[in-house]
Amino acid sequence: SGAAFPNIGALIVISAPAFLAIWLLRIISRQLHANIAEMHDARDRVVMAQTFLALLDHGKVTPEDRVLILHSLFRPSTIGGADDSTPPHWFELLMERVKSPRSSAG
């Protein structure tokens, strides 16, 4: 008349597909977020290029301005993958804070 143990097989059958679905949704959402960020970056670059070409047509671009505009047009993309590393533990942060004043004083 003891308590019955839960059926582990049924638990695995239910939890494995749920875990897989959550994992796939996480991957898809990360890809969607990266694509949206790249779309916004590309849209900004199109606007900069069109502005640059319009200014060139009117002769309002100095050589210094041309360098600044071309550097911002051809800058490396700041869009990267999400960092999946775990955040630092509070104790690690505390130990770094305690160690830093001693190392700078000596």
Image (cartoon, rainbow, N blue to C red):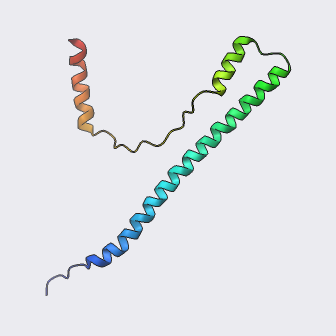
Q: Is residue 5 left or right of residue 33?
A: left
- Looking at the picture, does residue 13 appear above or below residue 56? below
Residue drawn 42% across and 42% down? 83
Which quarter of the image is occupied by the C terminus?
top left
Residue 87 percent location from the top left of the image: 34, 41
Residue 82 percent location from the top left of the image: 46, 43
- The mark total stands at 0
Residue 43 percent location from the top left of the image: 69, 38
Of residues 39 and 76, the one nearer the viewer is 76
- Looking at the picture, does residue 51 appear above or below residue 68? below
The part of the image, by quadrant, that contains residue 54 is top right
Q: Is residue 105 left or right of residue 85?
A: left
Of residues 44 and 92, the one nearer the viewer is 44
Q: Is residue 37 left or right of residue 62?
A: left
Q: Is residue 73 left or right of residue 81?
A: right
Of residues 29 and 105, the one nearer the viewer is 29
Residue drawn 24% across and 35% down? 92
The part of the image, by quadrant, that contains residue 98 is top left
- Looking at the picture, does residue 75 appear above or below residue 19? above
Which quarter of the image is occupied by the N terminus?
bottom left
Q: Which residue occupies the extreme right position in the image?
A: 58
Residue drawn 57% across and 33% down? 77
Q: Which residue occupies the extreme left position in the image?
A: 1
Of residues 56 and 106, the one nearer the viewer is 56
Residue drawn 77% across and 27% down? 51
The part of the image, by quadrant, that contains residue 74 is top right
- Looking at the picture, does residue 59 appear above or below residue 16? above
Residue 47 percent location from the top left of the image: 73, 32
Q: Which residue occupies the extreme bottom position in the image?
A: 1
